[in-house]
Image (cartoon, grey):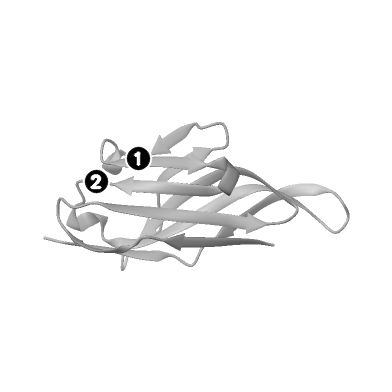
Amino acid sequence: QVQVVESGGGSVEAGGSLRLSCAASGVNYAKNEMNWYRQAPGKEREFVSGISTDGGTSYHDSVKGRFTISQDNAKNTVYLQMNSLKPEDTAMYYCQTTGSCRRWTGKWSACTFWGQGTQVTVSS
C-alpha cells in the first residue's frame, strides 16, 4: 500500500500565496506521476496540475502562470506553489499518485492512490 499525505492548505486573501506539499510513501510501488486535483462544493473534481518522474509538467488553463508544480524524487514529494490566488481557487485540494504496484503474485500492474485532501480557502 501507498500512503499519500497532503499539507499546506489554509486561508488567505485574494492575491496571496500558499504552498501545498504531498508525500507518497510505500513499498512495492514505482511512481510514475503525481498530480493535484481540486473539488469545490457542488462541483466535480478537476485536474489542476501534474508532474511526471522525468519532470514533465501540465496545468489546467485556469492556473497557468500562477501555480507551479515541482518535485523531490528522492523524497517522493511534490509541491504546488500557488500565487495570485483567487476566490475561485477555493476548494479541497487532493494529491494523486499513479504508477505500478507489485502484487502478491509478483507481477506489476497499474495503480492509483489518493490523499485525504487539504482545504484551500481564498477570500475576496
| Amino acid of disc 1 | Thr
Q: Is residue 40 above or below residue 107?
A: below
Disc 2: CA contacts within 10 A as few (<14), some (14-19) or many (>=20): some
Q: Are marks 1 and 2 in contact (CB under 8 Å)?
A: yes
**Residue located 22% across and 56% down the image:** 88
The residue positioned 44% from the left and 51% from the top of the image is 36
**In the picture provided, is 122 more to the left or to the right than 37?**
left
Looking at the image, residue 97 sits to the left or right of residue 41; the answer is right
Q: Position of residue 13 (x, y in %)?
A: 15, 59
In this rendering, would 95 be left or right of 17?
right
Question: 64 or 43, which is in the foreground?
Answer: 64
The label shown at residue 68 is 1
Q: CA distance from mark 1 to mark 2?
A: 8 Å
Quarter of the C terminus within the rendering = bottom left
Q: Is residue 117 above or below residue 112?
A: below
Q: Secondary structure at mark 1?
A: strand
Q: Secondary structure at mark 2?
A: loop
Query: 69 above or below 90?
Result: above
Identify the residue position indicated by label 2 in the image: 83
Give the image location of residue 112, x and y in percent: 61, 54
Q: Identify which amino acid the numbered label 2 is placed on.
A: Asn
Residue 40: which disc?
none
